Amino acid sequence: MAINFITHFFFFVFFLYTFSATCQDSDLETDCTNKWIHIRHLPPQFNLDLLSNCSAYPLFDNFCPYLANHGLGQKTHNKSHSWYRTDPFMLELVFHRRMLEYPCLTSDPTHANAIYVPYYGGLDSLKYLFGPEVNSSFQHGLDLYDFLVHVDSPNIWSRNYGHDHFMVMARPAWDFNQPLNSDPLYFGTSFLELPEFYNVTALTHESRAYPWQEQAIPYPTSFHPPNLAFFESWVNRLRRSRRTTLMLFAGGGGISANPNVRRSIRLECENATSMSANGTEYEKLCEFVDCSNGICQHDPIRFMKPMLQASFCLQPPGDTPTRRSTFDGILAGCIPVFFEDLSAKKQYGWHLPEEKYEEFSVSIPKEDVVFKGLSIVDVLTSIPRAQVRRMREKVLEMLPRVMYRKQGSSLGLRSKKDAFDIAIEGTLERIKSRLQEVAAQ
């Protein structure tokens, strides 16, 4: 299956890029002012060949099943039009496919406002994280740099020394910031620590606390509608959904005896199940969906139905500050509850503007929950019903901004900016600002 997919994808890439790059007319020129993007041609060793190794890393996972539908994965069931078993690590492939539909592509790099590098850096990192080159993780990216700078049209890079280049790396940035002189080595590669790539913009699942190269963009969820009718049908369902549960936590962890916010959430949820919901509009105060060991990752039915019935979805940090569940919850019309700013507010400014958080989310300091015994149930039940309704409506307004619509979607749906569109807008603006700063020096 993987080989057939890669073959079809290769021919699609060749045809669509050639077509797009040669179909520039005067009308499009007006619409594309300051939006032109050139796609660099990379040898398949940097993208498509990495897909053929989809079963080569048993310590990671066999990701061959998730290559279907250009990285969206297989449909959740045969009659599904919008729901897929999407693996978040396939974002590089999903983004590449969407880039080929971008209306402002140019074959002339000197005419471009930005240069897209279709490098599957997250997939390429697997050989360093889980494969035979684990002791050479400081070399991750050096072969790509050599190709961009010395092999393929060096003038494209030297024109702005990488300041106009961008790529997608479908892992948290934390996985790419191993110090070059780390001894002993710890989990991760040194891609973002390489001086060679300091000027390149990397779009990652999560950014670090003080990022320079990277910008966080939403994890892909399982919802990828092909047209406006399916999108609006889903939003209408969210509006009709009866929210009979006050709060929900879908995740794992929290079983350690050491104090942490997930442990506090699970303990409060267990206690809440034995408490009466009398005096509230809810039938139950808390529901816990156990997603330990990744059992929910490719099965959205496990968590989406309970999310549809909950008013608030708890989003505590785990191994990293953010969770894909944050975006799953928004797609379910479930108001997110954050326990630290780095979980979303300090990362996803392009997609979820920082000044909007009070309108669509709740913030509860994790220290107050863990060490001061603050009751999450008390905080949430104290919010007036009218305010909850306004917050949920704001969540629905934000929904398109964290959704990756299906490739080849209808013109009507394309009128709503999705996560890809906003990522491209943000990247173009970021590169423009960087080039202006360089010119002023």
Image (cartoon, helix red, strand yellow):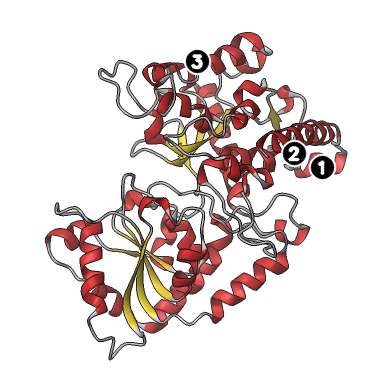
257 to the left or right of 266: left
Find residue 413 and report its horizontal and vertical position in percent: 71, 60
The residue closer to the viewer here, 4 or 349, is 4
Name which residue type carries label 3: Leu
Q: What is the number of the mark on residue 104?
A: 2
Quadrant where the image shows the N terminus: top right
Q: CA distance from mark 2 to mark 1?
A: 8 Å
Q: What is the number of the mark on residue 142?
A: 3
Name the residue located 50 percent from the left edge and 49 percent from the top edge.
Answer: 218
**On screen, residue 79 above or below 211:** below
Between discs 2 and 1, the one toward the N terminus: 1
Name which residue type carries label 1: Leu
Q: CA distance from mark 2 to mark 3?
A: 30 Å
Farthest top residue?
Answer: 150
Between discs 1 and 3, the one toward the N terminus: 1
Find residue 149 and report its horizontal and vertical position in percent: 59, 12
